[in-house]
Structures are given as C-alpha cells and as structure tokens.
Image: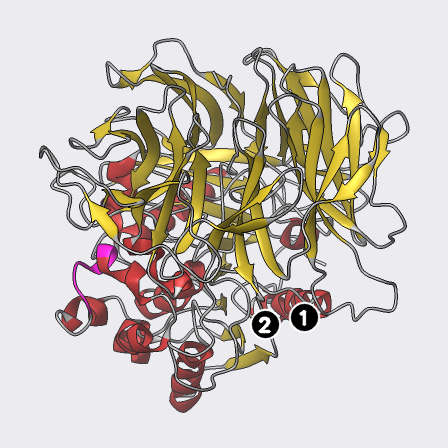
Amino acid sequence: MLLKRSLACVAVALSLSVIPALAQRDMPGVHMPGNVALSPDGATVAWTLRSHGGSTLHLSPASAPASVETAKTISVPNATGCAYGEPIWSPDGQTLAFLGACAPESADPTVPRQSQIYLWAKSTGEVKQLTHVTGDINQPAWSPDGKSIAFLFVENATRTAGALDAMKPWSGVIGEDGVEVQRVYAVNASSGSGLFTTAANLHVYEFDWAPDSNHLAFIAANPPGENNWWVAKLYTTTLTSVPQPGHPVSGVCVVRPNSNDTCPETVRVVFDPQTTHSALHGLQIAVPRYSPDGKRIAFIGGLMSDQGSTGGDIWTINADGKGAPTDITPGIDGTPTWEAWINNHTVGFVEDRSGHILLTDADADAHHVVPNSSDDLGEVMIGGGGPIKNAIAASNNGVIAYVLYSYNKAPEIYVGAPGKATQFTHLNSTADLHPPRFESLEWENEGFHVQGWLTFPKDFDPTKTYPLIVEVHGGPSASAGPRPDTMFSEAGYFVLSPNPRGSFGQGEAFTKANIKDFGYGDLRDILKGMDTVEAKYPIDKHREGITGWSYGGFMTMFAVTQTHRFRAAVAGAGLSDWLSYYGENSIDQWMIPFFGASVYDDPAVYAKSSAITFIKNVKTPTLVIVGDRDGECPAPQSFEFWHALRDLGVKTQLVVYPDEGHGFRNPAHIADERERMLKWFADNMPASPGVQTAQK
C-alpha cells in the first residue's frame, strides 16, 4: 500500500473535461476538507477546510478524532481574508510549510490573491513568510535534506498555467508575445533566497526531488505550456550547478537507449515518448517519482487527453536514461491515476476500476500487481485538493491520510494503516444530506464491458414514468465518478452518466478504443446504456435529453446528428467541426494521438467525426453554451454549430459568457448557466398528456 511520502493526484480528474470538483452547490451546508498532510512520524495531521470566503488550516493529533473546535488553527499573523492550501511537512517534522493567499478586505475580489509560502515552526508555534514573489505558485515540495523548498512558478503570471482558465485577449505577435513559462523555482528554507532551477525554454508540469536532494526529475515541454504537454518529455537536472539569475540553463543532453553515452551537461532527457520504440510511442506521461535509492523513476504513461486527467499504466525507467521503459502493470483491468514508491522494489498506486477506487501495489521487478494487495475503498472519490495536489498523505511509519467522499457520503478525512484507515474527522455528522438514490450500472456492448452511474429523480415512485438526461463526461480520457447531479434529480429527472469506450477505469485497451472513432463506438455504448436503463426503470422514451461539457459537449453536438432519440440537448463548450477546430484552439497537440495525424495530413478522419459534416440531420432543439475566452474549445466552434442550426430552422440558442475560459469561475455565470439548462429541458421535453410524471 501507499507508505512513502508523496505529492498526490485525484483519482478522477479534470479534462478537456472539466469534471466539476465537489462543490458546496452539490452538497449545500457541507464542510469541505481539502488538502491533508501527515507529519513524518504519523502523529499529526495538517488539513485545510474550504468555504466560500477562502479556507482555513488546522493541526490535529492523529491519535484521536478531529474537529474544527478541537484542532489548532494556523494563520498568517495580522492578515485577514486568507485562503490556505498545500500544507507539507519538513522531513524532520519540525516545520510545516503551506501556501497562504491573503488580501485586504478592500481588494478587488475578481483579482486573484498572491500566494506565498509560509512556515510554521513546531517549537515556537510562530508563522513566518518565506517567499516574497510575484506570480503563480503550485506544488511546493521539501527537498529530502530539508534545506530547500521547490515549487512550480510562473513569474508575473496573469492567469493560472494551463488551458482551463480564460485565455488572454488576442494581442501582439501570437505565440511569441506574452508567453508565460512555468518553471521549477527553489528557495532556501532558512533565508528564502531562491532562483529558477530549470531553463526558461522549458515549461514544467510536474517534478520530484531525488533522494540526494541534488537532482530533480521533471516533465516538461517547450512553451507554450498549455499546448505542448502532449509531447512533453521526462528530464532530470543536477542542482549542484544550478543556474544563476540571468544565466539560464543551456544545453540539453539526450542519452540514447542501450548506448554508452554520458551526459556532462546539467539537464538530460531521460525519456521521450515521441522517439521511443516502446508501447508509449506518441502517448503521454505524468507523475514522475524517484525510487528511494534514486536509481529508477516511476511514472504513469498512456493515452491522456488532458494534463491533470491522469491515467495509464505504471512504468519505470532508469534514472540515468539507460535502457527502455518498463510497464510494471501490463494488462491491468483498471486505470492507475497516481503512484508512489513504497520501497525500492514496490510501487503503490491509486486505481480507478469500474466505478471503484482501489489502493494497489505493483512489483517493480517482476512487473505485475502484487497478489491480494488491493484495498477496495468502494464507490467513492478520493482527493479534495484538485489535480496534482495533496490528495493522499503518508508518514514514514506506514500511516496514510486522505479525503473520501461519494454520492451518499459527505467528505471526511480518513487516517490509518493502508486497508485499515478509519474516519478521522466528523465535520458533517449533523449534515442533512438526503442524497438521491444512486447506483452503478454495467452493461455489455460490442465486446466491451461498460460502466456508468444512474441518479434517480427525487421522491422516485416506480408507478410513474420519468424523463431521462444523459450527461456525458469530458476528456475523453477521464471518467464520471460516483457524484450525482442533484440539479437534475431535484427537477425530477433520471440522469445517466456513462463511462463509454475511451474512458478511464477499464484498462488501456478500453481507453484507446475510440482512437479515430470519436462519436461512433462511444455513442453506441451510451445508447446501449440508455437501453439498459429503459429496460430496468420507468423511463418516458419521448422525454430523453443529452448534455455534456467539452468532449461531452462534442458528444452532444455529434449525437443529435446521428440519432433523433434525444428530444432536447445542451452542448457546453463543445466542438462542432474538428477541421476548423484544429486551427482555432490553443491545444492542437492533444489531437494527434487520437486522430493519428494532423488535420493537414488526414482531413478525412477529422471530417468523419465532425457534427458539421452531418448537420442537416439535426432536428433536436439545442442550447449552446460557451465562454468567450475558452482556449480548449474556442467559442467559434459553438458559433458554427448554432449558426448552422439557425440556418436550417432547428430551434437553438447560443449563450456566450464574458471573461470565462473552459472552466467557468464566476458564480453568477454558473448559476445562470444551470438555470438556463433546466429551463431548456423543461420547455423542450414537456410531459405528454395523460402521462404520469414527478417532474415539477
């Protein structure tokens, strides 16, 4: 199980996806624990608690249940309106580092607050500010010797790194002016003095300290970072000769597999998926982790549609770059989403498997899952802090901690030995959840075993018939988790959230099954899932709708060109024409692994999956929603679909939200979007005369 220290990643993550994080609108009145960190001796738990106004940071002894009332609260002195996150313990357990973002009450609430790293000293209880930087900080990590803290840093950032936030307005020389590069920055833990440790021509997505504290492993690509993650490489760098300010790293050394090459330079390419002859050729890599002896680096490799939506097999490679990478979980039924070394021979990982989350071990030498090592946590989600954050914490003596939640389980922190962790907090023991009825469904289609989730309408009465809404997740390399859509349930709908081919949770072959086939096999899986629901529950077949965001928005647009089964549709941040999309979006590199070639080399494969190709088939009333600064699925894609439907006389409406990116941030916009969706389905799927329904 997971025994070593770690930075962690949620098991079901973001995408071309925007799978919504658990939010207070989903569970009103529920307390939301976020990040969690265990002291090295396993005696103390640091944890954050989120609210609408920010978040708080607490310390609790691991030996007894914790609560806000009994926990010690850590805060920045003489500051108000702070948000705290990413607590991390020093290797000796004497210092807790954390991010704090504070601002005066008069500050503009629409402007992000500047995060800084603060240190809490166990001996004195004092909090001091370590960094004084301007920019975006992420993934702070102590060096194993406790002398430094490194973090991902975009200096003078105008937005969060990545493709989800609103893109900058077009201006200047595109692709050259104003490009912001995320690099690894390291500071002295005593003085706070620091400098960049990676080159200005490499955008870094994730990193890990080597056990000797003199090397880093990191995954990076040339800028712009939001576009090139799909062709990122695994690097290592030596910190004994770190670059000085004004003197960036120069020279990247490539070690050829099975050669006698050596690398005298500071930086080396350890693994390049674009040139490898292994099964990872042309695929993606994430979550680099050094083995305890520093000789190997583990990572997750596979077909991934979005940075942060991590899934594949667990691979290892020699840290010096010699030899080929090794898949240590070949043929696994589920999808590993995060990993950490337990010892020099065993890797523990979080696995998404057919709607369940498991903690499993892999033998890094024998290349297989360790028999009887899996701890099935059930139909749950694990995390709370978001992608590549502290979702799982571990101590040096085998204690782990994590946040667990599900459709019928409010989020709480669990602490204990692997397989024996028990509920540590009872933050929501008095919460009146009243979750809707919810169940996992499984069905067979064309040789594939498919899983999905069914949310029941509020106050379900089996003697009545109900409308059904299909909600398709983004990605496609992602999965819908056990999180009901209470918005539709409250309005009297069944909701089917399928995980068709292309999703995580069924192994790499299943994830790869929609390559060059977007909208075909995956849609047939969804329709077969609808058949399964209709055969089992009282569904009004004349009142079925479809919706989705991002890839789910594409599936919505494409589905209504292939079938008239849906009576209403809502396409969020969708893609209507893959040919024009290729030239409009900010992340065109992601498309090559899925389509096999660029649009200029094989336009036919893109046209085959474009809704515009079949647009004259559409009869379904469709609401189209998008942000005006979406870089992943640009607004012109939604304009193109809406314009075509309007020209063809199909009922449609386009709503563009200002200053929004791929993931909406403005609460007023989110509320308006949800209200419009409910109204669209209600207006376009009215109850037939004489048909009993519970919809209000």
The reply to whether discs 2 and 1 touch (Cβ–Cβ < 8 Å) is yes
Task: Decide: is 330 above or below 443.
Answer: above
CA separation, marks 2 and 1?
Answer: 9 Å
Q: Quadrant of residue 620?
A: bottom left
Estimate the x, y position of residue 18 in percent, counting from the top left. 51, 56
Query: Can residue 565 be seen in this snapshot?
Result: no
Callout 1 secondary element: helix
The residue that disc 1 covers is 669
Residue displayed at 67% across by 38% down: 190
Residue 80 horizontal side relative to residue 487, left or right? right
Which amino acid type is shown beneath numbered disc 2? Glu
Q: Quadrant of residue 344?
A: top left
Callout 2 secondary element: loop
Indicate yes or no whether the magenta region holds residue 303: no
The stretch of residues the image draws in magenta is 593-598
Residue displayed at 39% across by 9% down: 372
